[in-house]
Image (tube, rainbow, N blue to C red):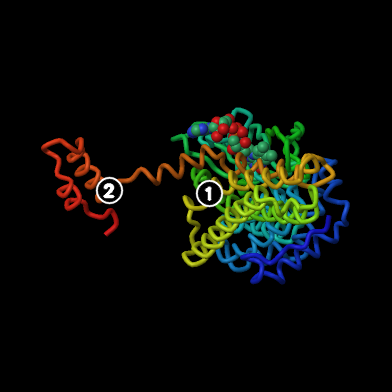
Amino acid sequence: MTWTAAPTLHETDQAEYRADVGKVLSSFGKDAFARWEREGHTPREAPAALGAAGLFRRRWEDGAEGGLPLLVAMCQEICRVSGGLALAAMGHSEIFIGALRWLGETPSQLSLLESALDGRIIGCFGATEPHGGSNLRGVRTTAIAEGSGWRLKGTKRYISNVGRADYVLVLAKPEKPEHVSDLSLFLLPLDHPGVSIDGFFDTVGMQGCDVGQITFDVTLPYDALLGRPGIGLLYATHLLQFERLAICAQLTATADTALRLAVAYGRRRTVGDQRILDKQAIRHKLANCQAELWNLESRLSELVSVAQRNGKMPAHEISALKLAAGESTGRIIDTCMQIFGARGYSKNFPLERLWRDARLARLGGGTDEVLSDLIASGLDRHDPDADALIARLEALDAPRNSPQTHSSAASSNVRPVVA
Ligand SMILES: Cc1cc2nc3c(=O)[nH]c(=O)nc-3n(C[C@H](O)[C@H](O)[C@H](O)COP(=O)(O)OP(=O)(O)OC[C@H]3O[C@@H](n4cnc5c(N)ncnc54)[C@H](O)[C@@H]3O)c2cc1C
């Protein structure tokens, strides 16, 4: 299906960039995306073509935060046609290029950055391991200083696009860490002797992008280490903010696609002599979806502006948006699928693919539970006004007819929480 995006919030400003992304996407041919899904891989040439067209370079031209509107535009355009390519391209751009651009110093790291920006080298990210991915402090892959370089040894699992990438950015710990967060980032070429791709996992969605496991025991040069040793977790946490924002952009575009299809179907499909779009039960469902989607789009736009203005990613707010967008988009697509009846469940229509693809957002880039915990950590703060008000109200909390209770006293003692 060729899908022309309707202008929404971010689209007017980045029309030219969106059109250029669209040109690269159309160059793959109309059957390509379905073929990639069947094959379980996005060919290396696809993210490479985005790079060759200068699209990664332009995204990064105005800096990490300055280029966020283009990141949003790129994610939205790509995932309208291929969730798999969006996943592969975002790992390459936001984690691999993001890390090299931020931390690259040596001539070989800077040269790798140039190649990555042009799509001559494609990168991916390996943090998760077979025993778990939520708690990165538990990473078991080791990096031991050996001679003038490093011996990197371990297994990384669920790496998106590892089957078609050239490099993987690996999170590893020293042999004897000083503390649990003592991790570092390493650049590992996937064709290096000692690296083996163990295989791939069959997943529910995003089937156009492989997700695999690698095992390695390799000796690398000293500048395989990216950034300073011991603060790799901090680096990874920062880079994940960009991936999370990219996921939010993909989710809004996926929800928008599903909603537009459902409305179009509702206009065509009649039951008796009435369009299903005229049934109140259907209209109201779609209206609720639109309301939810507009809220997500506004919040995404606002967070992009905040990050651009402050030159800093609002980490808690981005996590909160990803948490809300993951759940909300799932609901929206599910409703849209319902409106298609059996066709929504059939592979002849794209709703079932959108439904499957969107589910990953609640796991990848930080699970709902991990993000909830992060947001909750910001909630649990001393709030003198609210604490004082609760204390006063508790002191006055008695049944209405009690002789000690003076409702007028209660109200006169109450100060507004926000002055
Ligand atoms: C298609 C796909 C692509 C992926 N791509 C990549 C990639 O490119 N690179 C990469 O490194 N990883 C990737 N992942 C892995 C992904 O990041 C992890 O799946 C995710 O971090 C969760 O780790 P886990 O699967 O090991 O679950 P676990 O960590 O085992 O968690 C299991 C459950 O326990 C919950 N849980 C864990 N900790 C807590 C807590 N403290 N409080 C409450 N609940 C908790 C989790 O939320 C989850 O529900 C990918 C996964 C998939 C499915």
Q: Position of residue 112 (x, y in %)?
A: 69, 56
Q: Which residue is mark 1?
A: 235
Q: Which residue is mark 2?
A: 386
Mark 1 and mark 2 in contact? Answer it, CB < 8 Å.
no
Which quarter of the rendered picture does the N terminus lie within? bottom right
The residue under label 2 is which amino acid type? Ala
Q: Position of residue 280 (x, y in %)?
A: 65, 51
Name the mark on residue 146: none
- In the image, residue 176 above or below residue 101: above
Residue name at image x 25 percent, y 45 percent: 387
Residue name at image x 67 percent, y 62 percent: 73
Ligand 1's image quarter is top right
Which quarter of the rendered picture does the C terminus lie within? bottom left
Mark 1 lies on a secondary structure that is helix
For disc 2, the neighbor class at 10 Å (few under 14, some 14 to 19, many from 20) is: some
Q: Position of residue 319 (x, y in %)?
A: 52, 48
Q: CA distance from mark 1 to mark 2?
A: 36 Å
For disc 1, the neighbor class at 10 Å (few under 14, some 14 to 19, many from 20) is: many
